[in-house]
Amino acid sequence: MPNLNRIKAISEKEVFHILRDSRTLAIIFILPLLQLIIFGYAMNMEIRQVPLVVDDHALNSSSRALVDAFIQTDYFRLVPKGPGVLDPGELFKQRVAQATLSIPKGFNQDDFTAQLKIDASDPNSAQMIQSYATGIVNTWSAKAGVGIALSPLILYNPDMKSSFFFVPGLIALILVMICALLTSISISREKEMGTMEQILVSPVTATEILLGKVLPYIFLGLMDALLILAVGMLLFQVPFRGEFAVFLGFTFLYVLTSLCLGLLVSTMAKTQQGAMMTALGMTLLPTLLLSGYMFPIPSMPPILRRITYIIPARYYLQIIRGIMLKGNSVQHLYQAGLSLVTMSVVMLVIAARRFKLRLS
Amino acid sequence: MRSLKVIGSFIKKEFKQIIRSREMLIVLFALPAIQLLVMGFAVTNEVKNLNLSFLDYDRSAHSLALIQNFGTGDRFRIVPVDTAANPQELISAWKASVVIVIPPGFGEDYQQGRQSHLQVIVDGIDGNTASVANGLVAGVVGEFHQKNMQTVMPRSPMPRLNTQVELLSSMSFNPDLKGSLNTVPGIIAILVTVTSMMLSAISLVKEKELGTLEQLLVTPVKKWELMAGKLIPYLIITLVQLQVAIMLARIIFRLDIAGSYLVLLLFSVIYLFTTLGLGILISTKVESQQQAMFFSWFTMVIIILLSGFFVPVQNMPRAIRWISFLNPLSHYMTVLREIVIKGSGITQLLNELRILGGSGLVIFGISVISFRKRV
């Protein structure tokens, strides 16, 4: 039976550790907020005002109407063409234009072909520019009564704001950063300094040490997560459509999984520096790159896609985005929750085995 | 002469230390490989394999042809569903990201040259994916229309309008639209930044922590000799790593530099003054190695996010574009991309040359002053 007083004593000691290193503490709180602001305002995939150079050889009403159709949208911005022959390659190299539209002399008689050249050094932007252009031409036809009219409906986030996506994501990232990264570093610090052995020979049991060490970080992580949630909701009007109780339940589960991960990492490293590197490699980077936090999982090659299945944040991201944005309830999310439970159990078993091995 | 000798012995000592610790060799060779592999494949703004469902109430030849148009390429992955399904429920349950509803009579209207309608429902939780998906759907429908208008329109009762424009588009510099062409130079730029900054940020603190800095200071070594002796090895290491990364990029991604290698090297050396300076600056301000790591990590996260690596800078709001303008990594990344992809020379990159040169002078200058004060 763990003794509450001892746990409290160890927790207090850990709190002092955290508070004394005020710069690290400041980073823990400021970095996510800065990221939130950058992501909320700056991470915009949508391209607007693509600089376009038009080379119009026809100069008749049809060609002008076509150019107008391009310019009237917010997507393209007309850049005046310099004298001489149009050389798209040179224009792209000097970065004055990202696309060129050239209309041949015979436009409007029987040939309605226009040439669009796009700077494809950023293939994603290039493809979007192409989609815009095809869309514009199609809409132009649709207005005249032919063609296909599209009526898009964007669910959950009609303005397509990136902050809706990143606020829940940041919560997942912060929880893993604090619960796995900081915990593993703090455990290996004791090991490196030799104080772990001193604590072990005292009447405190291993469970009490772990609980005592872990509790302050759980508290810190949850505080940070709630701060992000509050700022996200106040500053960016991110909705919270689901039930708060469901959110808390799943978040608690995720915190447990992160702690198991942190424990596993700490059994692998001997020094603080080693723990930091291992923890970065096993917690932060996979969560950043492979969880769907920033980059959509379906776009990854099959091997990486398979790796994402063993990253806890992948499941939690689905859960938290589902609850906050889609208003999902437990019946939509129990599968993701079960994956988290399975992962925690597996990691805990491995960590416990390795821990025993090291002590003996 | 004496200074050269002193610096030379410093360089020798640093290299010995580096070769002795295996970690450094890992940083030099394994890190670029892992970063290129993982980031090169994972970091993509492309939207691929989007789960798309059709609720086809029309079931005409045209609706089937339209669905087939979406099936080609790796943009969409068609998830078959029952037409009785509710589109919103499909998205809410994570089964589909896009649902297209084809109303009855769609094919008929289209065949007759009347305006036909499609309803597109997109999962908006990821705003970026949603807007890309929206554009992609419009693109595919537009293509479908371009393909079919010759066969459909003549039968329409309307006179042929001069609105049926055919758009031929072509992609310059990257006709196959390879994503790696854009991300790999970006990864290399980040790699150069991370290595040079981390190395120089830890350098002085380490000597401070071990107490060897005081020993050095009582020797007749001058401060600038100490600084040069520390920085020159880091400069060389980073350039070697740049070389390794370029080689790996050639092997893994078959990426060749279109432009001049010498220009690339020149820009890299100029840029390294800024990052090494930043590292020294951090090193003079912190107390421990751990803090140095945290601080350089913090700085790097911010400059990488605003560098245009993930999202083109021109997509950002004006205020943030100004901040990005002050971000040296953003300019260095542009330089690498332009040289590697387009083969641009110095004439096209004069602006970047001025900015990077200026920032190198300013930041390195400040770091020298801070170093002299601190040591």
Image (cartoon, rainbow, N blue to C red):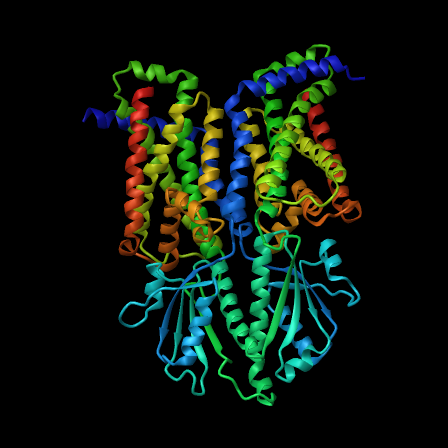
Q: Is residue B40 above or below residue A277?
A: below
Residue at 77 percent across and 49 percent down: it is A332
Quarter of the figure with residue A286: top right
> Could one spot residue A192 in this view of the protein?
no
Residue A233, given in percent of the width and then of the height, sits at 62, 41
Residue A146, given in percent of the width and then of the height, sits at 58, 80
* Quadrant (top left, top right, bottom left, bottom right) of the C terminus of chain A: top right
Q: Is residue B95 above or below residue A313?
A: below
> Could one spot residue A312 in this view of the protein?
yes
Q: Residue furthest left?
A: B1
Using the image as rendered, state which of residue A305 and residue B122 is in the foreground.
B122
Residue B232, given in percent of the width and then of the height, sits at 31, 33
Quarter of the figure with residue B234: top left
* Quadrant (top left, top right, bottom left, bottom right) of the N terminus of chain A: top right
Using the image as rendered, state which of residue A246 and residue A118 is in the foreground.
A246
Q: Is residue B374 above or below residue A302?
A: above
Quarter of the figure with residue B170: bottom left
Residue at 51 percent across and 46 percent down: it is A41
- Lateral position of residue B233 relative to residue B149, left or right: left
